[in-house]
Image (tube, helix red, strand yellow):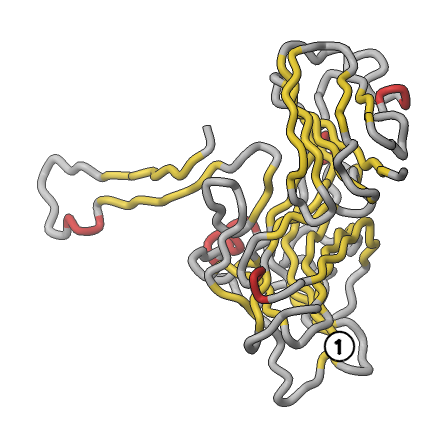
Amino acid sequence: SNGTYTITYTIITQNGDDAPSDNVFSSEFKITADNVYAKSRTNSANEPLAPTGFYLWEGVTSYDDYEACITFKNSNASRLNAMGLNFSCKPVGGTMSNEIAEIRMYEWNDVFTDLTDPGFPAPASTWNLNQLGSGFYFYPDESQNGVNIYLPFDEAPISMTDNQRYLFCVYTGSDSLKVGFDNKIDYYATVNNYLEYSGPVKTLPAGGSPQWYAAGFGFDVSPSISVDFDITPTSVSDNSNSSNLLPYPNPARNLLTIPLRKNISEMVIVELYDLTGKLLLSETYNTNQSVKLNVATISNGTYLVKLKSSDKTIDSFKISINR
């Protein structure tokens, strides 16, 4: 189950040991929710921990923007849909009001086996990327200093491909924002074992071309970004992906009808989020029929609906309210 665990390896000798101090080795690891992916540590709510933040110092070089990213590749990625990111920012000085952060998702299409491959991109090079998703967050004031923000992709749900490399990034063109990082985790051994970098960074010098650095700011810091995945069931019931399962009417006025997949039974939780990730409504139903969500009190706009069923599958939809 979710939580933090410790593995302890102990050597017990039968003939004594002149140096017993190195006979015990412990390593801590964390299991997150099965739909959350992060390279940083996470808290009990599966949100990334960010004890520090990084920005680009412009004392010598001026920059137009920068991105902090985490990598993802999985042989079963086609079972996942990318929904959005959790991240945080801090002010460089005393203010962050009216500053903008953007989330991005890319296909990383450079062809290489691992970081020892001659085809691996050189430092400060331009990578072969295809942007799949984005979302914008406007910081209203300093009350959001270091606060985790969940931001869905405007294009969500975004389907994925097995064994394809992806980047999930926080982008900013502001010199007043620091992107949250975790400096309490070290990927030195992981990188040297798997020969894959985990936290690349892109810079854009003023008037220049994008420069990507696969090693980021080093192996001992990791971008505090977590990805929210919608997990597609491995066995799909009849009509499980057909258009008649989409909420209707869309746009809705006061009442939204949400059909359920045939294999859903017992309890289902319906949640409505705004595009900043704020939970606006949560209703629980015990049915395998369509559910009706009263949205009469919700303002006009675009929202994300999540259905969480008792079999731990999650369905997500974007809907609009317009009166």
Neighbour class for label 1 at 10 Å: few (<14), some, many (≥20)?
A: some
SS label for mark 1: strand
* Quarter assignment of residue 235: top right
Residue 266: image x %, image y %? 63, 10
Q: From what the image shows, is residue 210 above or below residue 50?
A: below
Question: Would residue 301 appear left or right of 142 to someone viewing this image?
Answer: right
Residue 186 in the image: above or below residue 281: below
Q: Locate residue 297 relative to residue 227 in the image: left or right.
A: right
Residue 52 in the image: state x and y as whole percent: 49, 65
The one nearer the camera, 35 or 306, is 306
Q: Residue at x 49, y 46 (%)?
A: 42
Residue 89, given in percent of the width and then of the height, sits at: 59, 63
Residue most toward the bottom? 60
Report whether residue 196 is seen: no
Q: What residue appears at the point 46 percent right and 28 percent down from the top-left corner? A: 1
Amino acid of disc 1? Asp
Q: Quadrant of the C terminus?
A: top right
Residue in the foreground of this view, choosing between 20 and 158: 158
Where on the picture, by quarter, is residue 7?
top left
Q: Nearer the viewer, residue 85 or 143?
A: 143
Of 35 and 190, nearer the camera is 35
Residue name at image x 23 percent, y 44 percent:
24
Residue at mark 1: 64
Q: Residue at x 59, y 74 (%)?
A: 95
Q: Is residue 81 above or below residue 241?
A: below
Q: Quadrant of residue 79?
A: top right
Q: Position of residue 159 (x, y in %)?
A: 79, 37
